[in-house]
Amino acid sequence: MAFQKAVKGTVLIGGGAIATVFGLSQFSQYRNKHGTLYVEAAEPVPVPMKNHFPTREEQLLTLQSTSEFDVLVIGGGATGCGCALDAATRGLKTALLERDDFSSGTSSRSTKLIHGGVRYLQKAIMKLDFEQYKMVKEALRERANLLEIAPHLSAPLPIMLPVYKWWQLPYYWIGIKLYDLVAGSQCLKNSYVLSKSRALEFFPMLRKEKLVGAIVYYDGQHNDARMNLAIALTAARYGAATANYTEVLRLLKSTDPRSGRARVCGARCRDVLTGQEFDVKAKCVINATGPFTDSVRKMDDQQVPNICQPSAGVHIVMPGYYSPDNMGLLDPATSDGRVIFFLPWEKMTIAGTTDSPTDVTSHPIPTEEDVNFILSEVRNYLNCDVEVRRGDVLAAWSGIRPLVTDPNSKDTQSICRNHIVTVSDSGLVTIAGGKWTTYRAMAQDTIDTAIQTHGLKAGSSRTVGLQLEGAQDWSPTLYIRLVQDYGLESEVAQHLASTYGDKAFEVAKRAQVTGKRWPIVGKRLVSEFPYIEAEVAYGVKEYARTAVDMISRRTRLAFLNVQAAEEALPRIVDIMGKELNWNEQKKKEELEAAKKFLYYEMGYKVKSDQLTDRSEITLVPSDIERYKKRFHMFDKEKKGFITIVDVQRVLESISVQIDENTLHDILNEVDLNKNGQVELNEFLQLMSAIQKGRVSGSRLAVLMKTAEENLGQRVVIPVDRSGGGL
């Protein structure tokens, strides 16, 4: 043991000396930048940028009427849209097809970080792996570029690494300093060490027992789905014919007259919304379908071996009070060797991720096992005064990472997310692997390969420093003009500015008058989030075609609070129905499809598992009697159940009025067998689940408790959803 400590100490001292010498040589590069990044702009774009991007119908017409494109990209995630933007800005005639919505897959289900990868740098150093080092170096360069080209959608975020053993402090400090130094002139801000007291000051929820101190470093954070959409919209403005809900049925091939070989020359497509089929011809077809890479490759050649190994990553969202407003947390070594991030995002707290092999599916589902694993790891780092409750999980989702297969790997954790570009014998170009942060570099490599292998005439990439949709005239104070010029709430104005950038004014112009003294315009979809009705109509302009598009990718409601998203659905469907001329049957179908999406893919299913008609009642006898007494205050006739009429009678006796629709929703949350009434057993199951922390924010429980305490007095009883935990 003593020998191990001595060796460890020698390594640390030696490593510290190396880092110090290296640091001194690099420090002058960025000591005075104070977080200002330096990104060298590429050459001017040879094609004009359109003032307005075409409608989806116009894009489909272009796809059908163009005799041949230079490049056809399959896949509307970050990499696919990045390829379309790179190609279009080089002057190539470009098309992009996505069978679902832009960013509907992995690109909207990330940890929301723009980062080089601290753990990859650790692996590069420990294993002397130069390839991993190059990947980190590239990612840090791309991090700087992304923060510059979309400042409204991204920002630096300090992340704390708490230290609970003295020897880990210099160990982690060296690693984090090397991370800064690899970034060089593009380091966001210098990392620093905090004492125990200062760490608790910055992150008061942190577990203080045995805490030695903490190290804080900086990475970037963004709104991933909106960033993906911004790339797609920018590509459309530069002339790319992009279409969501357009499925590739098969690849088209022709015989090369010179070689006699079959060559991929386009794709047979189907408009998913209308069923219309048509061909899109192209000199080069690019497969950028993420986890579905191999399915497209097999359209080209059924015998081709798989090159992707999918890995599922689950995230959960909890209320904002679980983390400081502007400080994340990194758990570098969980109980099973994974890395867990605990980050503020959109005024909530996001925690994740898991990393486990999975099957490829368009509808990945978070499991209760993964949710509980994340909660368990969170508990290890939070103060015991903070009760980490299962009921505080507001949303949960699973994303599939398209990792590049290493046949010698035993598990996906050891697989590096380097990207590879391959070209098949028939000319299909495939881009696979990689990570969100490096989408631009991946796209550049892909288009370079396409130009070289297909003899396309185009110059070098123009996307370094190329501003994305909404960035051109954005400034940190833009929201003030929205408040002053339109009479929007400050919170709503800040949200619009950080979501749409300089296009926020177009959304504000659509905002309806509220009829109130303040705000003058901007009706919210739900009370506790700054999303307004005008965003729905604008979302249709941004190619949203389903209610799911609106709650998950144009707004992020589904990722922040599934119950709030469900609450907003009827109004969203009504507005979209007017914009897209939906009949009543179509509106009903959209409502049901969106509820199904929330139930299976966003964690509502695991919520229902927390309180079912089979849930155990683990209350002590005294609690059972107390809750029976409360229940019978509403159930005067001792029927064994309560209805809306019973609740209304009690509320009237204390001069409180709640509309019938709200009461119906309140009772429906607890009506487990859906028979229109809440039975005593269901109420006891609810109270038992609340005591165990599996359910939180039950409006019925709050209402009944408040009525009991204030019977005979006129009181205001809160009926707003208090977080809507899963």
Image (cartoon, grey):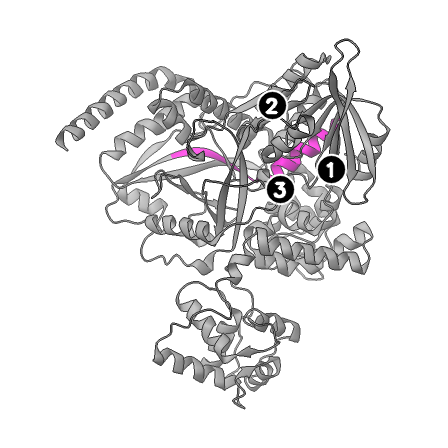
Q: How far apart are labels 3 and 2 at the CA level?
A: 20 Å
**Type of the residue with mark 3:** Thr
Report helix, strand or loop for mark 3: helix
Q: Earlier along the polypeptide chain: callout 3 or callout 2?
A: 2
Residue drawn at 23 percent across, 23 percent down: 11
Between marks 1 and 2, how big is the CA–CA gap?
32 Å
Identify the amino acid type marked 1.
Answer: Glu
The numbered dot on residue 247 is 1
- Specify whether 616 is left or right of 83: left
Residue 693 position (above or below residue 414): below
Left or right of 417, for residue 103: right
Q: Residues within 10 Å of mark 2 (few under 14, many from 20)?
A: some
Q: Is residue 441 above or below residue 315?
A: above
Residue at figure coordinates x 70%, y 52% from the top left: 547
* Earlier sequence position, callout 1 versus callout 3: 1
Look at discs 1 and 3 and give the one toward the viewer. Answer: 1
Query: Is the residue under label 2 in contact with that under label 3 (CB below 8 Å)?
Result: no
The reply to whether residue 477 is visible in this rendering is no
Look at mark 2 in the image and give the residue it sits on: 465
